[in-house]
Image (cartoon, grey):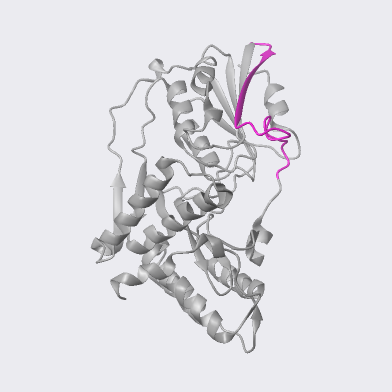
Amino acid sequence: MKSSTYINLLLNPQSLNKGKSILTASEVASDVGLLIQALEYAYPAKWIMSSDSWADVLQKIKAVHFEENVSNEVFGSALADILWQIPDGHLAVKLDGKVLGEFLHIQTKMPSTGHNLVSSGSNLAWNVEQRKSATGVVSIVAISHFPPSSDPQWFGFSEAIRGTLDSSAVIVDLRGNVGGDDAKGIEMVSILLGRELEMDWVQEVVCETAESLALQINTYELIIWNRYTSKNITPPAELTDHLDSLKGKANALALGAKDGGKVVVDHAPRSATSETTLAFKNKIFVLVDPVTASSGEWAALYLKRHPNAVIVGENTRGMIHFGNSGLLYLPHSGLCITLCMKINDLTDGRFFERTGIVPDMRIANRDSLEYVLSLGIE
């Protein structure tokens, strides 16, 4: 492959989702070729799958063809069902915002343990409230999603979490939380622990090639177009600066990435800290459901670093190990495919993708918040 061909993966945000509804065989072949390029040069899943399983996925995609003209939705569904073999919960094939694939929809589960306290009729990301119990005051920290840490919605969050430290118990409501930016989840846990959250239990495996950066460039191009340029609004300098940085790095890597672009980042271990130094020493109940995903799931795992944390509810979504999403656009079909550039590998061997976190206290078909409050928290 020539070093310059990563440019083929770059999208024009103005043409997104404007592919043809009916595709010829040559158009299918062209889009398949672009997908193969992205999978081979921009996607790290090959490093955690067996060589046979990875080769099988590539071979099935290369073999996709139709005897006659085909709709882009049928084509996209065929791709989605093949890609389902890859254990990546973020991986999705979309057409005009609709997620395609039979296997995905079979797997999707509806929650049965009630709604997040700030998810209904509110655009708030979080709220903290107190309720009286037989043993004192219980603090309920409800987080519906994780906007970027710089978002003004987070104003007062740190102070509110510190205000829970004298509670008889803390309940963290992550029901329906589909994720976002990890930063505030890490900050919350660090406050409850009374020290910086150690991350030496996570190893990052990153694909850093011109092709992987092209897909991240696409993501930022689309954000800038949808939120700013298309509305004649000047985008924030930090966004455009980051986009320019990605483009410069992609050009530098176009001549060839060392070790196929595989970059492994280990977090240095810290010295053990005594449990007696915990800022919050009482029980923490973490409410999750089948919608809890990505950074919502990571927040639950972070909270489990506290020795008194208990996860309550149903299995989470299972979108944990892949991150740093990029966007591949197939121009003939108008299909958008989400491909992640990073794998978060837990050093203890646990793997939650598509199965989710199993709660310590499993309940279903009743409100998990009311259930925990009814326990007589001690």
The image position of residue 343, as x and y in percent, is 41, 52
The image position of residue 261, as x and y in percent, is 30, 60
The residue at the point 37 percent across, 58 percent down is 213
- Check the image and name the residue furthest to the front: 232
The residue at the point 66 percent across, 54 percent down is 108
In the image, 211 versus 50, the foreground residue is: 211
In the image, 152 versus 184, the foreground residue is: 152
The image position of residue 215, as x and y in percent, is 43, 60
The image position of residue 85, as x and y in percent, is 53, 66
Query: In this image, 211 relative to 133: left or right?
Result: left
- Check the image and name the residue furthest to the bottom: 67
Residue 205 shows in this picture: no
Does the magenta-highlighted stretch encompass residue 221? no
The quadrant in which the C terminus is found is top right
Quick check: 245 above or below 32? above
Residue 359 figure quarter:
top right
Residue 123 shows in this picture: yes
Residue 101 figure quarter:
bottom right
The residue at the point 53 percent across, 14 percent down is 163
The stretch of residues the image draws in magenta is: 111-135
The quadrant in which the N terminus is found is bottom left
In the image, 121 versus 176, the foreground residue is: 121
Quick check: 161 above or below 220? above
Magenta part mainly helix, strand or loop? loop
Does the magenta-highlighted stretch encompass residue 119? yes
